Image: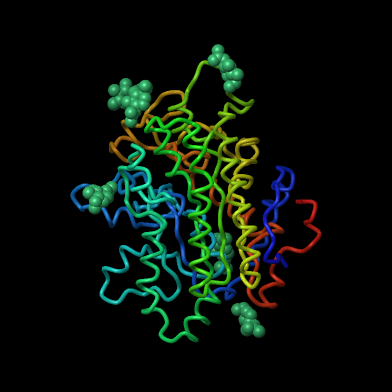
């Protein structure tokens, strides 16, 4: 069983290929009774679309978002399910309802979990960035705001300290990924690289202090994803396009931007190590989205992504089929014929097909989310997969 100090290690592409050949889905139904999500557009299942005024919806409220799985836009930034959805399915839980939609219902039902993630959400508060001339025009609902929402609804989910502790002990918390909107808006506001680098430890600390708060409230099992490689996303490849070929790797990705993402992920993992020492009873898992995504970029053809990994499926032309002034969903004619042939959905997010493969590697791999009791523990992939590490 993965212990509290476990982390995913580097997933090489051979190991990954082996994993996705595994046909058995030994779902761990019953291991967790609820799932709580925090994060940004990688995790939002419909909050931002419910925050915006009905007469001014954001672009992911329009087709072809949602076309593959839901057949209508749900507010998810993809053509279908996100990693949090695959996690919910794996544990036999309902797809996690977005908090903002549910709280407006007469009798919100959050007993099997709720998702606070909001498209555009940074880890640090907007005020921090605004003081530095960096503007986020998408949302104010940073990690701290999402935590406040959680604390506000907690009394409606459990009533005594013993029932809360039981409830939270059997809940799984997905915290992130965060960082994309801390750095993305900074890049676009022309902050210097030195300044942006100086945000990294602060972002990691903000994630860490949210984990501490959740543990103090009674959370025991927390999954903290790293960022996916920014240097492979069509939106950033377009913005930072350069004629200097030495800035690209053999797959056409921006080396410095991937290095930056790796740096963030390392700093976050160091933070997690410190928190594990403070809370030995808690299980804090680093979910390595970066390395889970890597094989898709290294060998897109092998996984059926015949249109490659770095060109967006839904977009309006240019080298990467991405144009920030005409994003996916902004015009009805924008479509994507076959999302399963692409890794990149809209320039900043991946297709359901890509998220599905990443989820398999995160859920069926050897350093996966551990389960809370011995019956569930036996469902974890066996030790012979240790070639992974
Ligand atoms: C462990 O989880 C399984 C799966 O839900 C459940 O059937 C079993 O009763 C649990 N065992 C204990 C000891 O809590
Ligand atoms: C098992 O989980 C996968 C996603 O991880 C899902 O597609 C499938 O429907 C689940 N199966 C059952 C029996 O719940
Ligand atoms: C953020 O909050 C400020 C002050 O309440 C408000 O003026 C602004 O419109 C909000 N921005 C977004 C993107 O919601
Ligand atoms: C950032 O710099 C670019 C190129 O110099 C410029 O076009 C853009 O307007 C600047 N953005 C901001 C937010 O200042
Ligand atoms: C091209 O990029 C490399 C790597 O970042 C850098 O060392 C070099 O100075 C750049 N060359 C030019 C002409 O800008
Ligand atoms: C992006 O879209 C805008 C608005 O439609 C257009 O003016 C511009 O030429 C496009 N840019 C590229 C590189 O295609």
Above or below, comparing residue 218 to residue 201 in the picture: below
Give the side of residue 156 with respect to residue 219, left or right.
left
The residue at 69%/57% (across/down) is: 365
Residue at x-position 59% and y-position 29% = 255
- Considering every residue shown, the one lying at the far left of the view is 55
Describe residue 158's horizontal placement relative to residue 175 as left or right: left
Question: In this rendering, does residue 245 appear at all?
Answer: no
Residue 184 vs 154, above or below: the answer is: above
In front here: 372 or 317? Answer: 372
| Quadrant of the image occupied by residue 333 | top left
Q: Is residue 165 visible?
A: yes
Count of labels shown?
0
Position in image of residue 283 (x %, y %): 62, 67
| Residue at screen point 66% across, 77% down | 373
Q: Considering the image in quadrants, where does the N terminus appear?
A: bottom right
- Tell me which colouring the rendered structure shows: rainbow
Q: In the rendering, at what x and y percent does residue 14 appear? A: 74, 44
x and y percentages locating residue 238 in the rendered image: 44, 27
Depicted 265 relative to depicted 300: above or below: below
**Near-viewer residue (27 or 202):** 202
Determine the quadrant in which ligand 6 lies.
top left
């Amino acid at each position: 069983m993965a212990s509290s100090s476990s982390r995913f290690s580097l997933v090489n592409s051979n190991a990954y290929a082996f994993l996705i050949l595994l046909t058995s889905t030994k779902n761990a139904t019953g291991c967790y009774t609820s799932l709580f999500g925090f994060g940004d557009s990688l995790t939002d299942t419909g909050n931002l679309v419910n925050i915006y005024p009905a007469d001014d919806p954001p672009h992911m409220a329009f087709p072809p978002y949602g076309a593959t799985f839901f057949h209508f836009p749900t507010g998810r930034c993809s053509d279908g399910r996100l990693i949090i959805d695959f996690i919910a399915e794996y544990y036999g839980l309902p797809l996690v309802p977005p908090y903002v939609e549910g709280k407006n219902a007469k009798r919100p039902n959050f007993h099997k979990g709720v998702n606070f993630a909001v498209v555009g959400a940074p880890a640090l508060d907007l005020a921090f960035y605004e003081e530095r001339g960096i503007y986020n025009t998408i949302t104010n609902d940073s990690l701290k705001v999402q935590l406040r929402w959680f604390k506000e609804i907690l009394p409606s989910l459990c009533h005594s300290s013993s029932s809360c502790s039981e409830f939270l002990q059997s809940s799984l918390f997905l915290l992130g990924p965060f960082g994309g909107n801390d750095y993305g808006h900074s890049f676009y506001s022309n902050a210097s690289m030195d300044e942006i680098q100086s945000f990294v430890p602060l972002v990691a600390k903000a994630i860490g202090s949210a984990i501490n708060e959740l543990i103090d409230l009674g959370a025991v099992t927390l999954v903290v994803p790293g960022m996916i490689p920014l240097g492979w996303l069509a939106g950033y490849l377009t913005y930072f396009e350069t004629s200097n070929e030495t800035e690209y790797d053999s797959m056409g990705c921006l080396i410095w931007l991937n290095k930056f993402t790796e740096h963030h992920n390392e700093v976050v993992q160091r933070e997690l190590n410190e928190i594990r020492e403070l809370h030995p009873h808690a299980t804090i898992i680093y979910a390595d989205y970066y390395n889970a995504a890597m094989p898709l970029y290294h060998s897109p053809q092998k996984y059926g992504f015949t249109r490659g990994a770095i060109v967006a499926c839904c977009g309006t032309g240019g080298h990467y089929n991405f144009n920030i002034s005409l994003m996916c969903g902004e015009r009805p004619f924008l479509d994507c014929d076959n999302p399963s042939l692409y890794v990149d959905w809209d320039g900043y997010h991946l297709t359901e097909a890509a998220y599905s493969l990443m989820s398999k590697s995160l859920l069926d791999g050897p350093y996966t989310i551990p389960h809370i009791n011995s019956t569930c523990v036996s469902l974890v992939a066996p030790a012979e997969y240790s070639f992974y590490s």
